[in-house]
Image (spheres, helix red, strand yellow):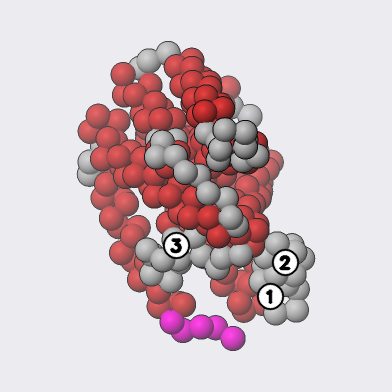
Amino acid sequence: MINNNNIIQRVLLFVIAIPLIAAAIFFLPQQKHIFFNIITVIASYISSKELINMLSHKGIKLNSKVIPFLSLPLPITSYLIVRFNLNSDIFSIVLTSLILLILLIAISTKKSDNDFSNNVTFSATSLFLIIYPGYFISYIVRFSEFENASLIICFFILIVFLNDSAAWLFGVLFGKNNRGVVKVSKNKSVMGFLGGTVGTFVFMGLAKYLIPELKPMPIISYIILSSLISLVTITGDLVESAIKRSCNVKDSGNIIMGRGGLLDSIDSLLLAAPFFYYIVKVYSEKGF
């Protein structure tokens, strides 16, 4: 049965959020989309805080004031590389430095003089926070390097959200008897997956004709790339579902109407971003 409140909330979010994002992308493209990328960096920090809060429900306490900021250096570095055309190796240097920082913090953090029992948990969790969301979200920032960055960013966001919305709608309408295929999210259905894939095909088809870097594209490349984007988009949603189930929480937060936390809304964007970035980059340079 369709929840009318859920539909209204999703429609309002789409009607309000998408135009605002589009305005930030198309009307404020100065300095390699600095306004949009500031929003992206802030989103990385908020998502990191939500993840830390979820982990606390599992008993994992990260008692360091530095940890919530670990998701910031990589997206900021990506922007600086794009904005000032810096050597891309700087990104690897920053990533390596962050890893070293975490290890240094870990060996200096203990419960007592002889108790380092939390050392491995602290190190592993902190490294995870660098990657998710920091590393993944940095690829959204890197879209700004492309000549048609405004179109590419907008289409990427629309493709992912359309996939999510189509998957939800098809799942509600036709997925009653084919749910539970993926154990981590029992409400996910086969028809939902197919609906999300159809939605991705539609928007990738539009992108094929409107984004110069993606045309002309052979039909087989179009099918493969659309399927890949659909798969990683859905996987992004499932990955966060697994984290929430592990932490025994329903949502990552409560700041977005009808969606829960910010991480609940951008989980699919995080995993899809690197794939979409390299699809555009490789295709624009070499084609398929």
Seen in the picture, residue 195 relative to 210 is either above or below; the reply is below
Residue neighbourhood size for the residue with mark 3, other residues' Cα within 10 Å, grouped as few (<14), some (14–19), many (≥20)? many
Choose the circle earlier in sequence order: 3 or 1. Answer: 1
Kind of element beneath mark 1 = loop
Q: Nearer the viewer, residue 217 or 116?
A: 116
Side (left or right) of 214 relative to 172: left
Q: What element carries label 3?
A: loop
Identify the residue position indicated by label 2 in the image.
190
**Callout 1, which amino acid?**
Gly
Residue 163 seen in the figure: no
Category of crowding for the residue at label 1, using alpha-carbon neighbours closer than 10 angstroms: few (below 14), some (14–19), many (at least 20):
many
Residue lying at 52% horizontally and 28% vertically, measured from the top left: 108
Q: Quadrant of residue 111?
A: top right
Q: Where is residue 273 in the image (x, y as percent from the top left)?
A: 52, 41
Principal secondary structure, stretch drawn in magenta: loop
The residue pinned by badge 3 equals 253
Residue kind at label 2, given as amino acid type: Val
86 vs 90, nearest the viewer:
90
State the quadrant of the N terminus: bottom right
Q: What is the quadrant of the C terminus in the image? A: top right
Q: How far apart are marks 2 and 1 (CA)?
A: 7 Å
Q: How many angstroms separate mark 2 from mark 3 (CA)?
A: 27 Å
Residue where numbered disc 1 is placed: 175
Find the magenta span and give its range.
Answer: 1-5
Q: Residue 82 colored magenta?
A: no
Q: Distance between the residues labelled 3 and 1?
A: 27 Å
